[in-house]
Image (cartoon, rainbow, N blue to C red):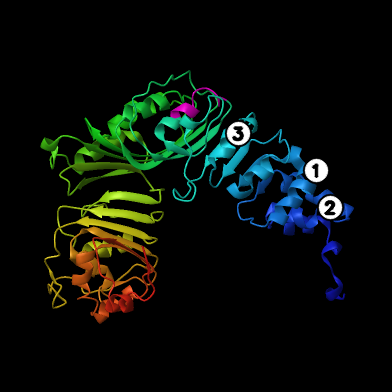
Amino acid sequence: MNRSNVYLLDLPDEILLMILKNLNNVDVLYSLLDINNGRLDTLVQENTFTNILKFDSIDDISFINRFCIDILPRIYDHIKSFTLHPFFMERILLANKYPNLTQLRIIHFQQDFVSKHFTNFFKNLKNLNVLEPSLQSYPPLSLRQLSSTTFSLQFLHIYDCFLLLDGRLKQLTKLSVTVHFMDDFSTTIHEPDILPNLKFFSLQSSYEFQQYNRIILLLRRMLFVEKLTLYLCLKNQNKYIDGASIQHDILDNMPQLQSFTFYIVSSVDMPDLFGKISREDIEKTLTNLRQPTTSMITHTVFGTDVCSIFSLPFEFKCLSDIDNGFPNMIFNNVTSLLVQDVIAFKHEFFIRIARSFPLLKSLSIINFKPQSSYNIDTGTRDKNESNSIIEYPYLTALDTRYAHKHYLEQFLNGTKAFVPCLIELSVESRQLKTVTMDFRRLDIQRTCAKIKRLFLSGSLEHSDEFSIYFSSLNVE
């Protein structure tokens, strides 16, 4: 057999389908539909290629034009799921009616389009997935700017989340929300009956807020939720949110719940309680949750204790408020981390950080205590402390603006840390001058020469020595 004469169209349908299923559906349709080949037309109009269309990586206007003019009119009634980018969202959604569209994933949002058109596209929507945008390039929407018959997907305030769930979306089975500002509000919101079809709900925000009871009232309308995800940061509470709170406030009111993934941080506005709560106290309240969980108590530099409770394994990308006493475990999903304590972080602490957070990309340090075992002028450590070089293979961003100068030196000094990907540094200007010895210290220059973004707290003269030291810099 002469194998060089075997072409794509010589393959049987079963083999062709196996090959095409490994490609993006929009590429398959664009390349093979309506090219004067009846066999291919039939194959690519199967539900496999027309039910789910992802345009998130497409940036070619001619590609979009052909899709809207030639392809979507032929398959519009097959489409069940769209993933869209804002540049072409309006063009695609207005190209046709999609009677079977039940899932919509939008990478970023544009206020004007939502205000004018979105209501028309949610008559059958059952699955709503909100993807977090860049705040600068794509500011999230606010329901306060929309009429009572329209709504947004990406929320600027927690208030908007309540407005969305005012009864207009009873058909939803899945709702995933990221809120950018969990600001407190006093506006009275009518809270209608239960959400009968909602099976999955996710609410995540890294911004602190106080009105925990508002969230609980919202959750109590979700009697039929089977999967729940919460990432909440609570401030000024009258008690710490512990296992007993979770059981009483959430689990007892969700009889259908099968999966609960959570990270809940709470602080109490009672100075007299500082240092009086222990991790052991919190752990006792978690034993009745009937799922793997753990907790942390962090003593912050601001004179408050922060209680963190979370399900295991830890499934979120961001973790805040850990101190010297964080539990020995591997956080495989965490890429952004905030550490703080009223006790100094020694070299061994950062060894533990590297081991426990293998994919760490962004690290912020809040600690004003010096590393007493290290002399920054002589470069020597206590003889009992480890001399090993700590490797952070994926760390790209470091923030030491609210930390002692020793911690800046800890990461810039190549004899203590190996940070091959570090390109962003946030730092206090005077500490930078001190640690670099007015930009003349050679063992630190090797790290600083790779920095592309430098965020300075305080003024700093950009001398010739500075420019040479940070040779890759784009000054912010």
**Residue at image coords 47%, 18%:** 192
Rounded to the nearest whole Å, what is the CA distance between mark 2 and mark 3? 33 Å
Tag in front: 1 or 3: 3
N-terminal of the two: label 1 or label 3?
Answer: 1
Mark 3 nearby-residue class (10 Å; few <14, some 14–19, many ≥20): few
Please state the extent of the stretch shown in magenta in the rendering: 162-170
Instruction: Answer whether residue 102 is visible to the viewer in this image.
Output: yes
Residue 408, quarter of the rendered image:
bottom left
N-terminal of the two: label 1 or label 2?
Answer: 2
Tag in front: 2 or 3: 3
User: In this figure, which residue is indicated by the disc labeled 3?
Assistant: 116
Q: Nearer the viewer, residue 160 or 46?
A: 160
Residue 317, image x, y percentages: 40, 51
Mark 2 nearby-residue class (10 Å; few <14, some 14–19, many ≥20): some
Tell me, yes or no, whether the two marked residues, 1 and 2, touch with CB atoms within 8 Å: yes
Q: Nearer the viewer, residue 449 or 457?
A: 457
Return the mark for residue 281.
Answer: none
Residue 76, image x, y percentages: 75, 40
Mark 1 nearby-residue class (10 Å; few <14, some 14–19, many ≥20): some
Secondary structure mostly taken by the magenta-highlighted segment of the chain? loop
User: In this figure, which residue is indicated by the disc labeled 1?
Assistant: 74
Residue 247, image x, y percentages: 33, 29
Quarter holding the N terminus?
bottom right
Return the mark for residue 34.
Answer: 2
Magenta highlight on residue 315 = no
User: Circle 3 — which element?
Assistant: helix
Circle 2: residue type: Asp
Q: Is residue 118 left or right of residue 11?
A: left
Rounded to the nearest whole Å, what is the CA distance between mark 1 and mark 3? 26 Å
User: Circle 2 — which element?
Assistant: loop
Instruction: Answer whether residue 260 is visible to the viewer in this image.
Output: no
Circle 3: residue type: Lys
